Amino acid sequence: MDIIEAIIIAIVEGLTEFLPVSSTGHMIIAQSLLGIESNEFVKAFTVIIQFGAILSVIVLYWKRFFRFNREIPESAKGNFIKENFYRFEFYWKLLAGFIPAAVLGLAFSDKIDELLENVTVVAAMLVLGGIVMLFVDKWFNRPEQGEQVVTYKNAFIIGFFQCIAMIPGVSRSMATIVGGMTQGLSRKNAAEFSFFLAVPTMAAATGYKLMKLLTSDTGFKLLKENIDVLIIGNVVAFIVALLAIKFFIGFVTKYGFKLFGWYRIILGGILLALLLTGHELTII
């Protein structure tokens, strides 16, 4: 993978990671168009550059991400453990949303890896997810309003919706946003909680992939030889994701998800057509 290919892949990652359109589906198309051969480093690169995308969420929402609850109940004051439990409530809720994916991801990692090699599954899920996007506004229509309170129960249920995205082509963003809307959140609030939940989820995936690469026979050497590609990839993913999030929040608040639904259906249809006509497509 050269610098230009890395920049293109990073742009695709930044554009699609937080939009409900499936970054995996777009990676397939980008890889095929560029003729990138899938190998140990390329697979690691596509996960490690998620760090740049994660950083965009933290920078864009830093005031809300680094927040501590100042409203400590009187019954908890004076008790160090209880006080800190309430003070870090936002992060405990993120943990509640992260747990389902962590547990199921470890339990079914082999099956997930099998699905990740199946482009037909990706294409089919793009189409099915697109159909859901066409009707989600009608099913869970909520008036747009200020920031809503997400309970532990809400976060945990949204976490289970996130697990659906273990099926490639579903889109983590789509699954968690729909999950949030089923819990009574508005489009904007559901999308923003989806972004927040992406931080621990994607950080865990990036760390796990990095650990596997470093513990392999050639992993450290690959990282050392391609450190410039990784740095550039993360910087590009950060900048593009920052712009994509700002666009997405404004667009979805005003227009909803229907356009994303049609886009997914068309993209999935193109992939299915390519597969049916004998084109060989692989997942990075």
Image (cartoon, rainbow, N blue to C red):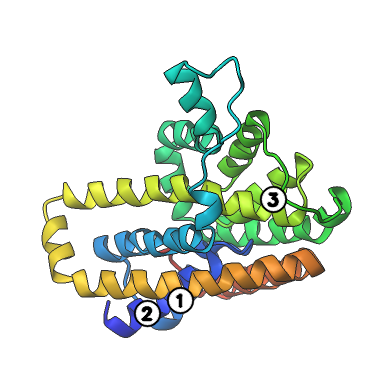
Query: Identity of the amino acid at label 2?
Result: Ile
Residue at position x 58%, y 43% from top?
162
Q: Residue at x 63, y 47 (%)?
A: 176
Q: Secondary structure at mark 1?
A: helix
Q: Disc 3 and disc 2: Cα gap in Å?
A: 30 Å
Residue furthest toward the bottom?
4
Q: Residues within 10 Å of mark 2 (few under 14, many from 20)?
A: some
* Residue 170 visible: no
Compared across the picture, whether 52 is left or right of 17 comes to left
* Rendered location of residue 133, percent (x, y): 76, 59
Mark 1 vs 2: CB contact within 8 A: yes
Which residue lies under the disc numbered 1? 11
Q: Which of the labelled discs sits on residue 190, or is there none?
A: 3
SS category of the residue bearing label 2: helix
Contact between marks 3 and 1 (CB within 8 A): the answer is no
**Which is nearer the N-term, disc 3 or disc 1?**
1
Could you tell whether 235 is left or right of 227 in the image?
right
Q: Decide which of tag 3 and tag 2 comes sooner along the chain.
A: 2
What amino acid is at disc 1?
A: Ile
Q: Residues within 10 Å of mark 1 (few under 14, many from 20)?
A: many
Q: Position of residue 89 (x, y in %)?
A: 54, 33
